[in-house]
Each structure stands twice: as C-alpha cells, then as structure tokens.
Amino acid sequence: MKKKYFINANIIDPHNTLNEIGGLIIDENGKIGGVGKKVNTNNIPSREKYIDLKGKYIFPGLVDMRVFVGEPGYEYKENFRTLSDAALSGGVTSVVTMPNTNPVIDNVSIVDFLKRRGRDKAKINIYPSASLTMNTEGNNMTEFGLLQNKGIIAFTDGTKTIQNTRIMSRIMNSAKDLNSLIMQHAEDFELAKNGMINDGIISTKLGLQGIPEIAELIILERDLTLLESIKCRYHISQISSGKSVNIIKERKNRVNFSCGVSINNLSLNENDIGDFRTFLKISPPIRTEDDRVALIKGLSDGIIDVIVSDHKPEDEESKRLTFAQAETGASGIETLLSLSLELYHNGSVKLETLIKCLTSNPSKILNIDKGNLSVGNDADFCIVDLNKPWIVKQENLLSKSKNTSIENKKLQGKVTNTFVKGEELFKL
C-alpha cells in the first residue's frame, strides 16, 4: 500500500483529546502514521502527493453498539455485504451485531459460522454478541466462558429482557467472574405486553396499546440495585424517557455502569407517528417531546455514554401492514452520524461530545482498540463535510431493507469518504 497524506482537516479524536486543524498520514501497512497539526506541507516530503481536505472534518471510524444483521436466517432483510455498504456510507467502521438471528447466536458452532461469514463478506469490523440465555427465552444461561473464548464481545437477549430476577442475579455473578459485558434491553414484559407506541394521548387517539415508561423504569431500578452488590460490567442498551435519565444520573454516583440511547429517541417524538406510520414502530418507543429534550440534555451532560443506530432492517412486506401487525424496527446506520450532527447544528450538544459518544466511549465499554486515531492503529476513519445539505431518500439507501424512519428529512452534514485499514471503501 502506498502512503497517503491528508492536510488542512479539522481533526476531532476525543480518545486522544485532539481537536485541531492538521493532517493525517496512512502508512504502507494501512496504519495511522501521523495525525494532527504536525502533519502539514512543511513536513511532507516534496516528492509526495497530498490531498487537501479544505477544512473538512476527520473523525475516527464510528463504533455502533447495536446493529442487526440478517445472517444467519434473515439474509433477505440484510447480509454482511449490504450492512457493510450501508455502514461505510455513514462513516461506521465497527459494529456489534445482535444475536437474535435464526438460529440464535447461543453456541460456539453458530459463532464459528458467523465469524467465517463476517470474515469473507464484511468490509467493516464485526464484533458479534451472543445471547444471555438459550434461544433468548430468558430461562437457561448460555456458556459465557466458551463463547468469549470464541470471540464474543458481549451478551444480550436483543429486544428481549431478562424478566426473572433470580436468573438475572445468576447472570450478573457469572459476568463478574468472567469479566463479561451484559447489554440489557430494559422493558418489563407484562407492562409492555402487546404495546406498540408510547402510552399517552397519541396512543389513546390512535387506539393503539401503549407501552408505559414505568416498564423501562422498573427494570432499570431492579438491575441497578442488583449491580450495587454484584459489580459486573453492565450496559443499558437504550433508554427512552426523562425519568430514566434521572435514575441513571442518581445511580451513577453509587455504582459503575454505562448507558446508551438510540438516535431515533434523540431525533423523533410520538407526534411524528402521525396517522399510523409503521416505519416509526420501534423498541423502545419514541416518547414525548419532553422526554426527547431530557435525553438530549442527559447526553450533553455526560449521563448517557453512547449513541446507537439501533439498525434493524425490515423488508417492505413486514412494514406495509396495519400498525399492530407490522414488525418493530427501523434502518438507521446510514443516517446515524448525520442525524447526530443535527444536535450540533442546532446548538444542543457540543460536536466533541457527539463524536465521543459515537467513537471512544463505545470502544472503552467494549474493551476494543477502535474509535480513535492513535498512531500505529488501523487507519479506520471518515471524512465529513459538516455543512453539506442532503435529503434522505429511500431509494438511495444502501441497506438491503429501506425502512427508514426519516424519509424525506433534510439533513446537514454528510460522510464523503470512509477508510478501513487504510483502504478507501466509500466515496461519495
């Protein structure tokens, strides 16, 4: 590989507290050879060509902690190739894939298959998670130790929650002993049963069964109480309400854990559902405008650690149904960064905070050396035109499924190039 030189870029790398105008060097091995203000025309050999980015931004490759890929079993919704293309167009270079496939990722033979497929088909870094319980049924724990030895990075039952407190206590004790990461989807099954959207005026008006915020709060309170005595690595996948932010803030003074939020819950509220827009049927549900504002403040204040796309592609046949029959989930990995930048452009969140929640924070939680521009590391990064306007059009999305929740939305800020291990794999 030939060396590449970039100059005149705004570089933001929270991991290395970099926020300056400078350049970046990719060496012959696809690693970062230099970064920052010391990389400029004065320090580049005269015979070498360089690329002048003219003020565009360089961010570390985004790390998305919650992504559904259809392999195995649901390849018609998404596969490793289409996921890679979609991710790269959004500046995402590393993803944690969910285990709720068919069959479920709950044993070492399935993990072996997944790793082979990922190695052969994916262009991005794939970090598979496995289920907490066999077949995500919430009864019998999976073999954490064996699965970790095969490369599993975290354990979650996907969109299901461990309802039995005794089993959750056992899971936490095993996670503590093995230094495993638990990622919990916080929702009480009985309270959320048959629910489709936020419980409130809109659900009443539309005649749809609601999901009350207390369904989330009860699981948070239970798990964080357990965590006070069983100190394991614990991550709340997504929260959706202002009251959840208050619980997180109060408990973080007493116990160590991390917390995420979906970009959907930061960008949309229940009014956006309009007249039964099934593409906005997601889990956890989008709630009130007050909840959305509280989540943004929680992000800005450092109470929430991570932003995820909660990318869950569904084919059109699964969404073009009545609201009650439609599948839950939205495609979001391509628009994750641009939607996040909306919070910067409107003055809600500092740019460095957003990038931290998309790069270094998830990497730290996962214990992986990604999401940074450290010299000697793989050159995984994206180049972004922060002010480029564009409109989300379903037909232009690269994901195999086109179930975006923000069709026709006008955005500001677009990834123009994405590099993985020094190779340019996406160019606008």
Image (cartoon, helix red, strand yellow):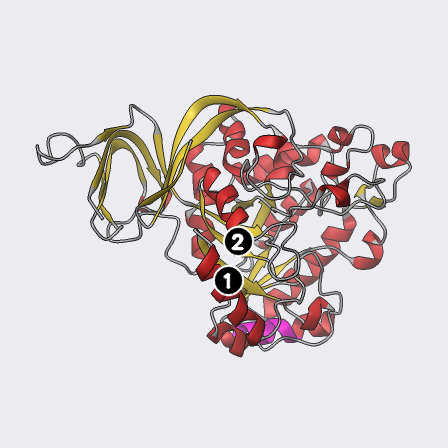
Q: Compared to 286, does 76 lie above or below?
A: below
Screen quadrant of the C terminus: top left
Q: Is residue 59 visible?
A: yes
> Front-most of 211 and 51?
51
Q: Is residue 153 visible?
A: no
Residue 357, magenta (yes or no): no
Residue 151 x/y as whole percent: 47, 69
* Residue on which the image places disc 1: 117
| 166 left or right, relative to 238 | right
Name the residue at 43% across, 46% down: 359
Q: Tell whether label 2 touches label 1 (CB within 8 Å).
A: yes
Residue 153 x/y as whole percent: 50, 64
Name the residue at 56% across, 75% down: 109
Look at the numbered disc 2 and give the secondary structure of its residue: helix
Number of other residues with Cα within 10 Å of mark 1, as a class: few under 14, some 14 to 19, many 20 or more: some
Name the residue at 46% across, 29% down: 414
**In which image quadrant can residue 242 be found?**
top right
Mark sitting earlier along the chain (1/2) = 2
How many discs appear? Answer: 2
Q: Amino acid at mark 1?
A: Arg
Name the residue at 29% across, 23% down: 54
> Front-most of 257 and 16?
16
What residue occupies the far left of the structure in this picture?
46
Residue 333 x/y as whole percent: 55, 42
| 2 left or right, relative to 207 | left
* Residue on which the image places disc 2: 80
Cα distance in 3D space between marks 1 and 2: 8 Å
Q: Amino acid at mark 2?
A: Phe
The residue segment tinted magenta is 170-176
**In which image quadrant can residue 223 be found?**
bottom right
